[in-house]
Image: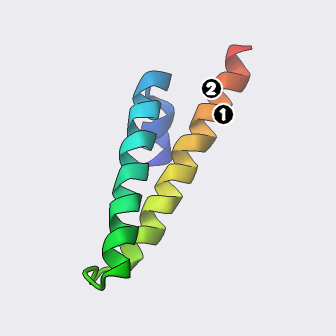
Amino acid sequence: MTTKEINNLAPAEIDNHVRDAREKLLQLRLRKQTGQVEKTHEIRAIRKDIARFETARTAKKATAK
C-alpha cells in the first residue's frame, strides 16, 4: 500500500491495518524460528508498512488537534 493510499484512509481503517500487519509479522517471526519462511524479506516489508501506518496515524492526530 502506498503512502498516498494510506493518507486517504480513516483513522479506524489505519488501526485495522496496523493490527493485521502486526499479526502477520508475529506469524512470520514464529515461522522463521521454525525454519518455514522462504521469503525472509517479507518481514522487513511488513515492518516498513507498520511504520508507514503509524506515521500516518500520528500525522492525522496532530492535524486533528
Q: Residues within 10 Å of mark 2 (few under 14, many from 20)?
A: some
User: Going 31% across and 81% down the picture, which residue do you hit?
Assistant: 34
Q: Nearer the viewer, residue 54 or 32?
A: 32
Asked whether disc 2 touches disc 1, contact meaning CB atoms under 8 Å apart, the reply is yes
> At 28% from the left edge and 79% from the top edge, which residue is drawn?
37
Where 49 falls versus 62 (above or below)? Answer: below
Q: Amino acid at mark 2?
A: Lys
Mark 1: secondary structure: helix
Q: Quick one: quadrant of the C terminus?
A: top right
Structure colour scheme? rainbow
Q: Which mark is residue 58?
A: 1
Name the spot of residue 53 as percent of width and height, x first: 52, 43
Q: Residues within 10 Å of mark 1 (few under 14, many from 20)?
A: few
Instruction: Give the residue at mark 2.
Output: 60
Q: Position of residue 49 (x, y in %)?
A: 47, 54
**x, y percent for residue 10:** 45, 23
Image-based side of 31 in relation to 41, left or right: left
Residue at horizontal 66 percent and vertical 33 percent from the top: 58
Q: Is residue 41 left or right of residue 56?
A: left
From the viewer's perspective, is 64 left or right of 41? Answer: right
Classify 58 as above or below 23: above
Tell me if residue 24 comes above or below residue 45 in the rendering: above
Specify the amino acid type for callout 1.
Answer: Thr
Q: Residue 9 at what x, y percent from top left?
A: 43, 28
The number of numbered discs placed on residues in the rendered structure image is 2
Work out whether residue 62 can be spotted. Answer: yes
Q: Residue 1 bears which disc, if any?
A: none
